[in-house]
Image (tube, rainbow, N blue to C red):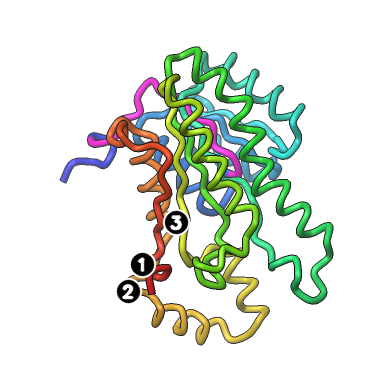
Amino acid sequence: MSHLSTYFPLANKVALITGAARGIALHIACALSAAGARLAILDVREGEGRAVAGLLGSGQGQAKFWKCDVSDDDAVRRVVAEAEAHFGRIDILVNSAGVDVDHPSAPGLPLRQWERAAQLNLNGGIVCSKHVLAAMVRVGGGSIVNVLSLYNMAEGRQDRSDYASTEALRLAGLNAQRYASCNIRVNSIQPGFLRPPALAEAMRDAGDLTQMLSDRAELQMLRESGAATDVAAATLYLVSDASRFVTGSELVIDAGYGGQ
């Protein structure tokens, strides 16, 4: 079988990926790198971020790390300008930095913790998109993918209790309309329960992790376990020319959990 990159080549493309020092975003970075993209890796975790850039070819000019808080407008403006100057272009933005947090009405949840999550999960994507759009216009188009919070899968997708994810979906649709004439596509990915380390740790703290995993599996149409690579493959599709006719869409990757 041919390598995935032969179907979705990203040669000569530059991708800016937020939160790529670990978790799902790290797998996305690896997938896009394997398809030929050069990577601007943004994260607040400097040690891990530099290690990822080294793994993906910083020595060969294929990747470079920037320490950046994506909710900081000035910092994002500076980093995007530096990334465009370094690579000569920006074609792809993957907004994947964020944190998962309980609903703000949860007993004992400090309001500042919820406010910080909203800054990262909603404002971060807005800020990064704002500053990357001009760079995409200069190269004749681009693709933005918003990887939404895992939280609003936790209580059932219909509940939509994660305000940040709901607003991110609405804004993605508006941006898809606004920038379609510039050949810029904007789509979102809604992961289901993929058991990333942070969420697994939170569930373990809340009770028996094994039983919780079993309970969730019963609510899925598919019995296979999800993985970060499933989101990475979907992202590769959405940023490549294979999805050239797709914009303003939400791709749900949840084994049918939300449809039950």
SS at badge 1? loop
Residue in the picture at 37% in, 47% down: 234
User: Residue 248, image x and y in percent?
Assistant: 43, 40
- Inspect the magenta stretch and tell me whether residue 160 lies in it: no
**Contact (Cβ within 8 Å) of mark 1 with mark 3:** no
Q: Which residue carries the number 1 mark? A: 255
- Magenta region, mostly helix, strand or loop? loop
Secondary structure found at label 2? loop
Counting residues from the N terminus, which is met first, the one under dot 1 or under dot 2? 2
Mark 1 or mark 3: which is in front? 1
Measured in 3D between alpha carbons, the distance from the residue under mark 2 to the one under mark 3, in whole angstroms, is 19 Å
In the image, taking residue 237 as reference, residue 80 lies left or right, namely right
The image's mark for residue 228 is 3
Q: Residue type at mark 1: give it.
A: Ala
Q: Position of residue 84 (x, y in %)?
A: 57, 18
**Foreground pick, 67 / 203:** 203
Say if 133 sits above or below 210 in the image. above
- Label 3 Cα neighbours within 10 Å, binned few <14 / some 14-19 / many ≥20: some
Depth check: give the residue in front, 191 or 12: 191
Q: Earlier in the sequence, mark 1 or mark 3?
A: 3
Q: Amino acid at mark 3?
A: Ala
Which is nearer the eye, 167 or 5?
167
Percent of width and height locating residue 4: 26, 41
Q: Nearer the viewer, mark 2 or mark 3?
A: 2
Label 2 sits on what residue type? Met
Q: Are marks 1 and 2 in contact (CB under 8 Å)?
A: yes
Q: Which residue is mark 2?
A: 221
Quarter of the image with the C terminus is: bottom left
